[in-house]
Amino acid sequence: WYQRRVREAVVSTQSTGESAMGAYATLAGEGTNIRVMDPFTVKPLDCEAVVRNARECGGRVITVEDHYPQGGLGEAVAGALSSADFITNQKILAVREIPRSGPPAVLLDMFGISANKVADAVREMTK
């Protein structure tokens, strides 16, 4: 967990943790603090921790995953948030095109899951 006075919770698995932490550093430099959560496992998901962190971040949650959204972290977090007793706003960043080969940095950006794209999603959500 990385936290200060936060505006968003960004939930990512280890494979996209670098993107989440890159967004954390970029946004901190702009004066916007986010909380990054690595749930360790998707199944089982620590639903209580997801809901608690969402509450502490004003219900705003962005998930980042390096595969299709179906059956992944974003859907698991959405399921956990469905039981929350407060209004939530979730954005799922995931691969939504046919995957291909290429340099990792280029692919992360192309599929919208790079540090810059995570930071953009945070900025958009906080407008």
Image (cartoon, rainbow, N blue to C red):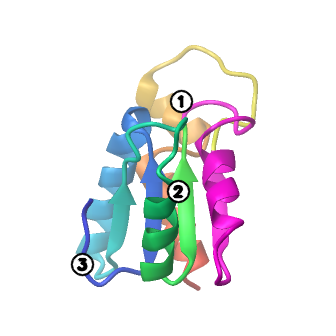
Q: Nearer the viewer, residue 21 or 79?
A: 79
- How packed mark 2 is, by other alpha carbons closer than 10 Å (few <14, some 14-19, many 20 or more), is some
Which quarter of the figure is the N terminus placed in? bottom left
Mark 3 or 2, closer to the camera: 2
The residue at 51%/36% (across/down) is 108
Q: Nearer the viewer, residue 58 or 50?
A: 50
- How packed mark 1 is, by other alpha carbons closer than 10 Å (few <14, some 14-19, many 20 or more), is some
Q: Counting residues from the N terminus, which is met first, the one under dot 1 or under dot 3?
A: 3
Extreme-top residue of the structure: 101
- Residue 92 magenta: yes
Q: Amino acid at mark 3?
A: Arg
Circle 3/circle 2 CB separation < 8 Å: no
- What is the number of the mark on residue 4? 3
Q: Amino acid at mark 2?
A: Cys
Q: Secondary structure at mark 2?
A: helix
How far across and down, in percent of the image, does residue 122 sit? Answer: 51, 69
Count of marks placed on residues? 3
Kindly report the distance in space between the C-alpha atoms of the residues bearing marks 3 and 2: 22 Å
**Mark 1 lies on residue:** 107
- How packed mark 3 is, by other alpha carbons closer than 10 Å (few <14, some 14-19, many 20 or more), is few
Q: Which residues are magenta?
A: 66-93
The residue at 32%/76% (across/down) is 33
